[in-house]
Image (cartoon, helix red, strand yellow):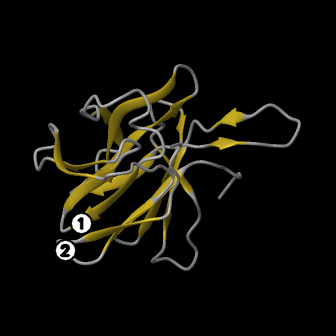
Amino acid sequence: MPTGRSSFDAVVVKDTIYVVGGWTIRGQEETTWCKTALKFDLSKDDSRWETIAAPPFQRRALSLGFQADRLVAIGGMQSKGGPTRKVAFYEMKKNAWSEGPDLPDEGRMEGFGSSSFNVGGRLITSTYGGNVYRLSKDFSKWEPISKLDDGRFFHRLLPLDSKRFVLVGGANME
């Protein structure tokens, strides 16, 4: 990447890697929140990192997924204001960001360290509080589909096939 970042997320859509969020930590220097989002075309031998439209937010510890023609940036820690449940859409064809539906209100930390992945054409998100949501087909709301006994953050939700997924790793403050 053009510069180092920590606490960002990335997703591959077809042949392109997208990177959103994070911050740059340089030892004793002041931490810098990343204001750019990037893409890299894996199908080209001479590909280089390119910036896409700047997100209307600066966040770290967010999750990034996709559904249909949109990237979905979920929650995270804001540069000002602490954790958030806010969601933003990036329409790849329009190179433009818009606001999405917030994660349902299940606590202040719900959007922090979530994990998201497309499973069978739909975006699934696992949150700090143990809630597992699916983004509606029309992008208007989050549908609860499961609740874990013990929530986790900084984990990975990975598809097994078009109907099943697994949650791997993570931490729990309890």
Question: CA–CA distance between discs 2 and 1?
Answer: 5 Å
Count of marks placed on residues = 2
The residue nearer to you, when weighing 125 against 147, is 147
Instruction: Tell me if residue 63 comes above or below residue 55 in the rendering.
Output: below
Q: Which residue is mark 2?
A: 162
Instruction: Tell me if residue 108 comes above or below residue 174 in the rendering.
Output: above
SS state under label 1: strand
| Residue at 48% from the left image edge and 45% from the top image edge | 113
Amino acid residing under circle 1: Val
**Badges 2 and 1: C-beta atoms under 8 Å apart?**
yes
| Residue at 21% from the left image edge and 57% from the top image edge | 68
SS state under label 2: loop
Q: Position of residue 159 (x, y in %)?
A: 30, 71
Is residue 7 at least partly visible in the picture? Answer: yes
Amino acid residing under circle 2: Ser
The image quadrant that residue 109 belongs to is top left
Is residue 92 at least partly visible in the picture? Answer: no
Q: Position of residue 36 (x, y in %)?
A: 56, 41
Q: Which residue is mark 1?
A: 119
Instruction: Tell me if residue 83 comes above or below residue 170 in the rendering.
Output: above
Lateral position of residue 64 relative to residue 103, left or right: right
The residue nearer to you, when weighing 127 against 81, is 127
Which of disc 1 and disc 2 is earlier in sequence?
1
| Residue at 58% from the left image edge and 59% from the top image edge | 49
The residue nearer to you, when weighing 137 against 149, is 149
| Residue at 58% from the left image edge and 27% from the top image edge | 79
Q: Position of residue 154 (x, y in %)?
A: 51, 53
Residue extending farthest to the right is 28
